[in-house]
Image (cartoon, rainbow, N blue to C red):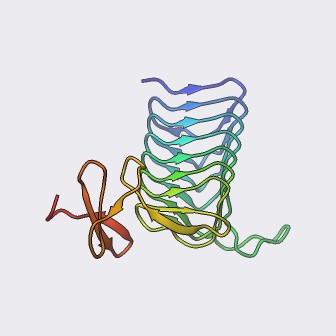
Amino acid sequence: MAIKIHPTADVQSLNIGDGTMIWQFCVVLAGATIGENCNINFNCFVENDVVIGNNVTIKSGVQVWDGIRIEDNVFIGPNVTFTNDLLPRSKVYPASFASTMVRRGASIGANTTIVAGTTIGEFSMVGAGSVVTKSVPAHALVYGNPARHRGWIHTDGTKLNACGEDIWRSHDGVLYKKGVDGLIRHESMS
């Protein structure tokens, strides 16, 4: 599969996977790495110290700054704002930028702000317009300003139902239990 780069995009990186599409007026700096089958929509900016996994969708108007890591199968909605400096000052640059991690399968709704240094857990969902000020556990549903935990979700994004102490069940019978970083599949019961 060929890489598709719109003629108006300024793509300096040579580290772009097969099947990735980069649309109009995007800028991708030379140090960035973008995986296979990604869709980087209109008017996005990707800085140097960025790693984006495979099958990632980044909608219009998103800037991905130094220190941000995005794993496979992540959805980032339009105008999501990442930050990477906890003490920003004009013309004052830190020795290193805060690292932000978006784990595999996570979805971040439109117009969300992600404060530097947080982790968005795997298969979690952040509701549109949220302000994420602390890390989000795996399979968590969070939203609001600041974003608060509102429930647990399955890998397909549907809500899980409580069915015992620290056990949740999906609509298709998959069981989850609490782990260190959020919910994990309850292998012994599924």
Q: Residue farthest to the left?
A: 188
Residue 184 coordinates in the image, percent (x, y): 30, 65
126 versus 30 height, above or below: below
Residue shown at the point (50%, 32%) measured from the top left: 20
Residue 94 coordinates in the image, percent (x, y): 71, 73
11 versus 185 height, above or below: above
Can residue 121 be seen from the camera position used here? no
Q: Is residue 60 or residue 130 the one in the foreground?
A: 130
Q: Is residue 135 left or right of residue 182?
A: right
Q: Residue farthest to the right?
A: 90
Of the 4 image quadrants, the one containing the N terminus is top left
Can residue 8 be seen from the camera position used here? yes
Q: Is residue 170 or residue 134 the one in the foreground?
A: 170
14 versus 23 height, above or below: below
Q: Is residue 60 left or right of residue 3?
A: right
Residue 4 coordinates in the image, percent (x, y): 55, 25
Q: Is residue 134 left or right of residue 63?
A: left
Q: Is residue 174 left or right of residue 107?
A: left
Residue shown at the point (52%, 71%) measured from the top left: 135
Q: Is residue 11 or residue 120 the one in the foreground?
A: 120
Q: Where is residue 59, by image quadrant?
A: top right
Of the 4 image quadrants, the one containing the C terminus is bottom left
So how many labels did they put on this image?
A: 0
Residue 27 coordinates in the image, percent (x, y): 69, 40
Residue shown at the point (57%, 54%) measured from the top left: 50
Q: Where is residue 95, by image quadrant?
A: bottom right
Residue shown at the point (14%, 65%) measured from the top left: 188
